Image (spheres, helix red, strand yellow):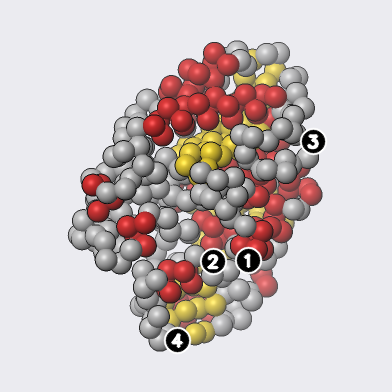
Amino acid sequence: MKNFDYIRPTTIPDALAAAAEPGSAYLAGGTNLLDLMKGGVTSPDRVVDISRLPELNRIERLADGGLRIGALVRNADLAHDPEFARSYPAVAEALLSGASAQLRNAATVGGNLLQRTRCSYFYDTASACNKREPGAGCDALGGENRLHAVLGWSDACIATHPSDFCVPLVALDAVVEIEGKKGRRHVTLEEFHRLPGQTPQRENGLEPGDLIVGVRLPAEAASFSANARYLKVRERTSYAFAVVSAAAALVVEGGKIRQARLALGGVAAKPWRARSAEAVLLGADADETSFVRAADAALADASPSGDNAFKIELTRRIVVRALMSALAGTPGRLPALPASPFSSIPGVRHDA
């Protein structure tokens, strides 16, 4: 690891001023950045430690019924907040399915949004990676790629986004609050992350020096609390990133689906909002037949990026399973194995 300057600002304006210098990187929980620095994947000249900024560590209920989560709120604290878990159960379940308890105690909400891909070629500095070094090529295209993207990939990059947390967030229309040199702006999470195209090094909508200060969930997001689940298939139940995942949320009245939200993880370079599937579900019967049609719509544009055609069928099945779980109802308590298909905690059926 090369030498770097270390700065700990006490206010957001001071943090922005410090990070305006080229070669700067923000440090919050450090659960991803420090690994990247140790491996030589990234080598900042200046580390700006924002972990002590008090205005970024609060969970606030808003007057309009929405929720604002400060960027420095720890993943574990958010998931275990009783009111949050009741109102946004799929988000809490996703948080508790990610990493280990030790990492969840350190990792932050803002940092979770900015996780870098876990593609092994990105982490191997001897391999060609356009995301790490634009123009270098993509060794994953002809390499070990069974866990890579099946949606939205390009010949420049086939990596996937690793976050669990972001999948139900994008389904629930979460908004990212960003502070920058031009002031504060709000960007939907769906627009925040970018597909690779020919510029895979541009992973999100941040400009140099920008700081994520919070995430907002609209009031409507809580209306799905009775029928919302996150389901994740992983190669081992603990401490593993998703092979594929799905967040499903429904409002059911009289056996018909009045509202539906669906997002996928582990399939693309960003959390994938399956809007075509939501359109299929709207007004349809709340049954497995409708869910199969929705899964087909969600994966209509999917294609293998290598030795990973199995992920398309696996995702199709996990979509149906997630929707069936959501229809069965949110469990009265979070499962001991959050988001696992092997969980035996039953849901509580809600049908107005």
Residue 264 in the image: x percent, y percent? 49, 37
Secondary structure, mark 3, is loop
Against 112, is 92 above or below? above
Tell me, for residue 332, which label it has, or none. Answer: 3
- Are the two marked residues, 2 and 1, in contact with CB atoms closer than 8 angstroms? yes
Secondary structure, mark 2, is loop
Comparing marks 4 and 3, which lies closer to the viewer? 3
Give the distance between the C-alpha atoms of the residues marked 4 and 3, in whole angstroms. 49 Å
Instruction: Identify the residue at horizontal 20%, vertical 60% (top origin).
Output: 135
> Of residues 124 and 288, which is closer to you in this image?
124
Q: Earlier in the sequence, mark 3 or mark 2?
A: 2
Q: Amino acid at mark 2?
A: Thr
- Are the two marked residues, 1 and 4, in contact with CB atoms closer than 8 angstroms? no
Against 295, is 53 above or below? below
Secondary structure, mark 4, is strand
Tell me the quadrant of the picture where the N terminus can be found.
bottom left
Q: Which residue is mark 4?
A: 5
Residue 88 in the image: x percent, y percent? 69, 42
> Of residues 92 and 87, which is closer to you in this image?
92
> Of residues 351 and 348, which is closer to you in this image?
348
Q: Amino acid at mark 3?
A: Gly
